[in-house]
Image (cartoon, rainbow, N blue to C red):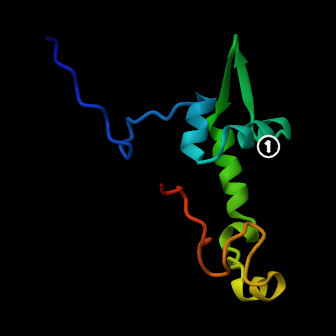
Amino acid sequence: MPFQSPAPSPSSPLAIEPISMRVPDACRFTGISRSSLYLLIARGEVEIVKMGAATLVLTESLRDLIERQRGTSTSRTAAPIRRRSHQGEAGKSGGRSRSGRQAGGFASTPLFDRE
């Protein structure tokens, strides 16, 4: 078995970053969905190269996208999560929500009929 040198660490100056990647890899590395990536491509925010049937996403284009998003005010602060109040629903529908559940609890109907 021939000797194989260990792969350089990512912080090593010998580590080589790919200049492009396929769509599934681009989604995995950025954390966005496939459909979101294709929307960004269609809007011209992410650059691609077609090589035959393969769609290659340029790594630099993904880095630029993330840097642009870091600069927006919405990405720096999280929006507060609004919780639905069950108290308001109880007064409107006699204690039941649209789904038929009791306000603040589960429906009283059993899941299985017992014989």
**Which is more toward the observer, 72 or 78?**
78
For the view shown, which residue lies furthest in the front direction?
Answer: 115
Say what secondary structure mark 1 lies in: loop
Q: Is residue 33 above or below residue 85?
A: above
Q: Which residue is mark 1?
A: 45
Residue at image coords 73%, 39%: 35
- The residue type indicated by label 1 comes to Glu
Within 10 Å of disc 1 (Cα), the crowding (few <14, some 14-19, many 20+) is some
Residue at image coords 62%, 81%: 104
Residue at image coords 73%, 77%: 96
Residue 103: x, y in percent? 67, 81
Q: Is residue 80 above or below residue 62?
A: below
Which corner quadrant of the image does residue 61 belong to? top right
Residue at image coords 32%, 41%: 9
Residue 70: x, y in percent? 67, 62
From the image, which quarter does the N terminus lie in? top left
**Which is more toward the observer, 47 or 26?**
26
Q: How many marks?
A: 1
Which corner quadrant of the image does residue 13 belong to? top left
